[in-house]
Image: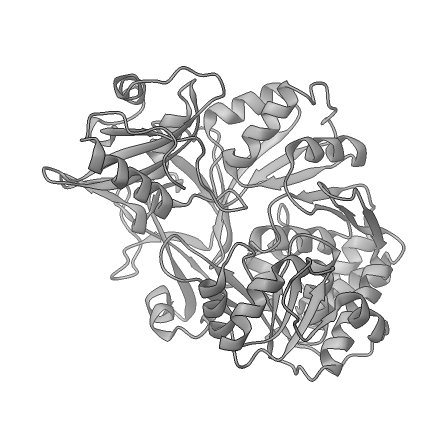
Amino acid sequence: MEYNLADLFESVVDVVPDREALLYLDHPGTGAERRLTYAELDAAANRVAHHLIDSGIRPGEHVGLHLYNGVEYLQTALGCLKARLVPVNVNYRYVQDELVYLYRDADLVGLVFEAEFTERVARARPQAPKLRHLVRVGTPPAGAPDLDALAFTDAEAAGSPERDFGPRSADDQFIIYTGGTTGMPKGVMWRQEDLFFSGMGGGAPTGEPVKKPEELAERVAAGGAGLTFFPTPPLMHGTSTLTAFIAFNFGQRVVLHRKFVPEEVLRTIEKEKVSSMSLVGDAMLRPLIDALKGPLRGTDCSSMFTVSSSGAIMSETVRKQFQELVPTVMLLDNFGSSESGFNGTATDDSGPGRGFRIRVHSRTRVVDPATHEPVAVGEVGRVAQRGHVPLGYYNDPVKSAETFFEKDGERWVLLGDMATVDEAGVVTVLGRGSQCINTGGEKVYPEEVEQALKSHPDVYDALVAGVPDEKWGNHVAAVVELRAGAARPSLEDIQTHCRNHLAGYKIPRQLVVTDRIQRSPSGKADYRWARSVAVEAAQSQPPGRVGPTGAAR
């Protein structure tokens, strides 16, 4: 047996076949509920695997998952792994041009897609000549184009539930497409063994990784049930899928909602006794706080012992508010990426004026991007990780050469995050180099300013961007969404507040108040949108003035 994700999953199934593995709740929508045991999920994945094989898709070929959260997503991902096909996540917000790029760049030969996206798929498919097999989940809307797509229920029914596959390898691939903050999406190619250790903690994210593949099932058999993992962001973002696999590696239960609806999330936490919930920063935590203070006041969340965030930081103010409402929970700001998996967790003293400080594991360093040598204490470098790292970016040898390198006989990945390290080895992450604002020769990282802004009592959410400036090259612009009912602050109010946390050159010189901060479905920052809003406002109002309300989306 090797460190192959399908082999590992099947080994868990064999020791706890009757234990509940997955609960799906369709909120909002029909209120439908599906519960599957490990044996039932295994058989369901086998059916998909056999169907894809019978349709002519061969080991190593790529199958896209263009889906909302649901049983079908994890069932298809597992089915691909069982058949040695490569699952590829597809962002369901993409429109025609973006879909054409991803379908072609990923060399998709198969696609499992939500019926709601039929028109988008129909427009993109003619420009993706390798895409030859389509499976549709659900019923297409009235008037949707006629696609040569097989209904998922028919595909599932036609496939055998038996587990009669050939041997697999730890070298089998898993591709995670990441949108990043600039440019077109990139497909991160992982060997499954590397992803198991870097993205899933080697079967024990908070303990000692397994030393042999067989040990995973041995641990599950020796333990018990009782934990429920609730990944609330979309599975199309790698973090949620990895969270689900971490739960499966423990032999525990996963709960899914089709979409994130705060009130329904809280009801599920109480009813299903959720143990651990994952989300993406303030964009998801704030609405939960609002619900707990309002219509869901008194909801019992005492079953939860961790709430973890990846992809965006939970601000200090929001953390304190949630901690007051749910005092027993541990809030974890995890640091990682599609290219590295998990790198570390924020220290308790992270926050405005101190930065995002993390205790990293032994495979993470801060290095000079030119020499790849560790930087001295206090110097700025880039975060890098060695050992279990991806093979590179699919179909992008140039970007792969810029990001992945070998040193001292080990493979390394160079992340886009700038950081410093102190004498104790604690890393302070400054932010993405691509988003760094150069103002009068000083470097400002948006995330640090955003932390300060979100500690203002009237600010609900905020993004920071650089806007061209004749005097300074760029000036710092704050795009903010106010709390409901809050009085509109002046730029001077915001600047006075920020001076308690930030050096003078980091203080915003422009304030734009907008109805809503635009983020991805998972809550990640949309810096391109923020910059366009700030630039548009600057063209009508010079720096030092308050920009317009209700900026364009």
- The residue lying at 86 percent from left, 61 percent from top is 39
Above or below for 218 versus 231:
below
* 540 sits to left or right of 224: left
The picture places residue 339, in percent across and down from the top left corner, at 47, 59
The picture places residue 167, in percent across and down from the top left corner, at 73, 80
The picture places residue 400, in percent across and down from the top left corner, at 38, 69
Q: Residue 490 is drawn in which quadrant?
A: top left
Tell me the quarter of the image containing the N terminus: bottom right
In the image shown, does 277 or 9 lie closer to the viewer?
277
Above or below for 390 versus 369:
below
Q: Is residue 326 visible?
A: no
Q: Is residue 120 visible?
A: yes
The picture places residue 179, in percent across and down from the top left corner, at 45, 57
In the image shown, does 235 or 519 lie closer to the viewer?
519
In the image shown, does 550 or 155 lie closer to the viewer?
550
- The residue lying at 81 percent from left, 41 percent from top is 226
Above or below for 503 versus 3:
above
| Numbered disc total | 0
Above or below for 535 versus 83:
above
State the residue lying farthest toward the right.
18
Tell me the quarter of the image containing the C terminus: top left
State the residue lying farthest toward the left.
471
* 227 sits to left or right of 146: right
